Amino acid sequence: MAEVFAGFISGYVVALLTTPLLALSVLKLRAANALVAQLLPAGVSAVSLTVLLHGALFLFWTAFGMLLGLVLLAMGEGADIAGSRHGAFSLFVIALAAAFVAPVAIVSQRLRPFALAAAALVVVVFGWLMPYLTEWSKFDS
């Protein structure tokens, strides 16, 4: 149970940190892409776009975190590797992030910095912090 809750909290942290990055990227992309410019006309407020994106990112990242919490629960106890509380889970998250980010980073130079920053954030929060949150929880006592 603690693993799933830690995944939810980690997902919420990632949603809070990626919302402004994605909003700024979409607003910059509006100037360069005709399709995005039609979807987001020049009069669209940045605040309303950020609120809408945060709602979607909250749902996505918390669900993703709870799924990773179930994976962490299924993996059981793990060995400490390189400062991580659960080395196998951290390696799993690194591989998962690389698998999702590699195609975007290779294909699009414009989205590469955002994709790499998001992947680093996912690895740090889910791969490193989430096992510590599980250990610090009070669910098992």
Image (cartoon, rainbow, N blue to C red):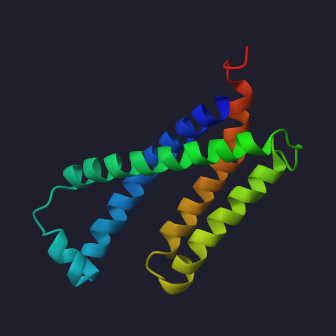
The residue lying furthest to the left in this view is: 43
Q: Pinpoint residue 52: horizontal percent, then vertical percent.
A: 26, 51
On the rendered structure, is 40 left or right of 69?
Answer: left
| Relative depth, front residue between 65 and 80 | 65
- Relative to 76, is 92 above or below? below
- Residue 85 lies, in percent from the top left, at 81, 40
Instruction: Write down the quadrant of residue 117 in the picture.
Output: bottom right
Kindly indicate the quadrant of the structure image that contains residue 135.
top right
Quarter of the image where the C terminus is located: top right
Q: Along the line of sight, which residue is nearer the eye, 28 or 12?
A: 12
The reply, left or right, for residue 16 in relation to residue 24 is right
On the picture, is 58 further left or further right than 53?
A: right
Residue located at (64% from left, 29% from top): 1
Name the residue at 34% across, 48% down.
54
Q: Nearer the viewer, residue 95 or 26?
A: 95
Residue furthest to the front in view is 74
Q: Which residue is drawn at 54% across and 35% down?
A: 9
Residue 103 x/y as whole percent: 56, 80
Image location of residue 128, percent across then percent down: 71, 46
Total of numbered circles in the picture? 0
- The image quarter containing residue 29 is bottom left
Looking at the image, the residue that sits furthest to the top is: 141
Residue for point 65% across, 63% down: 96
